[in-house]
Amino acid sequence: MKKYFKIFIIMLFALSINITNASASEVSKINTAKFTINEYDTMLKEKLSESNAKTVNNIGIYEQLYLERAKESTKDLIEVYGYTEKQAQILKSYLGTPIEDTPELRVASATCTGFVHGVNCSTSQLGVKAEWSWSSTPLLCGPGITDGVALRWQGTDTGGNPLNLYSDNEYIDIKYVGTSGVTHRTVYPEILDPYNAVQGPVLMDNGYGTARSGVLNLVLKKTGTKSINEAAIIFTYAHCSILLNVGFSFPASFSINVTSGTQEFIETVRITSSGATIS
């Protein structure tokens, strides 16, 4: 019995070492801030705010988008567009009723979920990843349609004082899904201010598939000799509207404004030098 007890203790000790030695990046992946947007919600909000509803052959343009998607085969809806069987059934049964009178469409609509987290963080630099992923191909995703991402930051040192952090190694990795499989595209964001803000386009169709997910990556590095305590991060993913692609503005206040006519979600977090992400 003592022999087995010793083995049990040794196993517990080994496990505790593995947990203790978990890297900062692994810890930071657990501490993530999450945001979600549903395309039905955004289109319904946009439609109800219009003074004159747009129509095609007496059917609203929003309804037309659902009808066009419903023309796809059930097989393609599931295998290419990423819908579940239940969602495909809802779409195939849709007959063009006003979307505000068809709340079940929300269940069948694409949902975009995102995370912001720190990786490889220390007192000298903070790795930042802002990720987003669509559950299925959104209705607004054709050629020429562009979504967008933007990110701002403000650093503080260990004394709680403002600390300039400059951006390095910025790139956006976008995953496209189509009938021929998965492709990736790397986009380099526009650096509006190396100490404050970046923005970049998300082309929703690259000719081989539609954008299903992506990651905005950058590294924030300290200036001077003072150590980083944390950085406040604002991340925005903006989804285009019927008529407008995405645009951003960056006011003097610590915020991001999105061009009228787009639907967006904005997440504000703090990433610490230990890799924790605090919402």
Image (tube, helix red, strand yellow):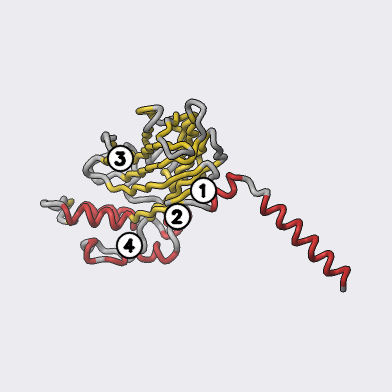
The residue at which mark 4 appears reads as 106
Measure the alpha-carbon separation of dots 4 and 3: 28 Å
Sequence-earlier tag: 1 or 2: 2
Front of the two marks 1 and 4: 1
Residue at the image point whose x is 27% and y is 34% from the top: 252
**Secondary element at tag 1:** loop
* Front in this rendered view, residue 241 or 159: 159
Secondary structure category for the residue under label 4: helix
Image point 35% across, 65% down: which residue?
90
Residue 247 visible in the shown view = no
Q: Are marks 1 and 2 in contact (CB under 8 Å)?
A: no
| The residue positioned farthest toward the left in the image shown | 51
Look at the picture and state if 154 lies above or below 105: above
Report the residue marked by disc 2.
82
Mark found first going from the N terminus, 4 or 2: 2
Residue placed farthest to the top in the image? 224
Query: Tags 4 and 2 in contact by the CB under 8 Å rule?
Result: no
Amino acid beneath label 4: Arg
Q: Are marks 4 and 3 in contact (CB under 8 Å)?
A: no
User: What amino acid type is highlighted by mark number 3?
Assistant: Ile
Q: Is residue 274 above or below residue 37?
A: above
Query: Could you tell which of marks 1 and 3 lies nearer the N-terminus?
Result: 3
**In this picture, residue 146 sits left or right of residue 155:** left
The kind of residue on which mark 1 rests is Ala
Marks 4 and 3: which is nearer the front? 3
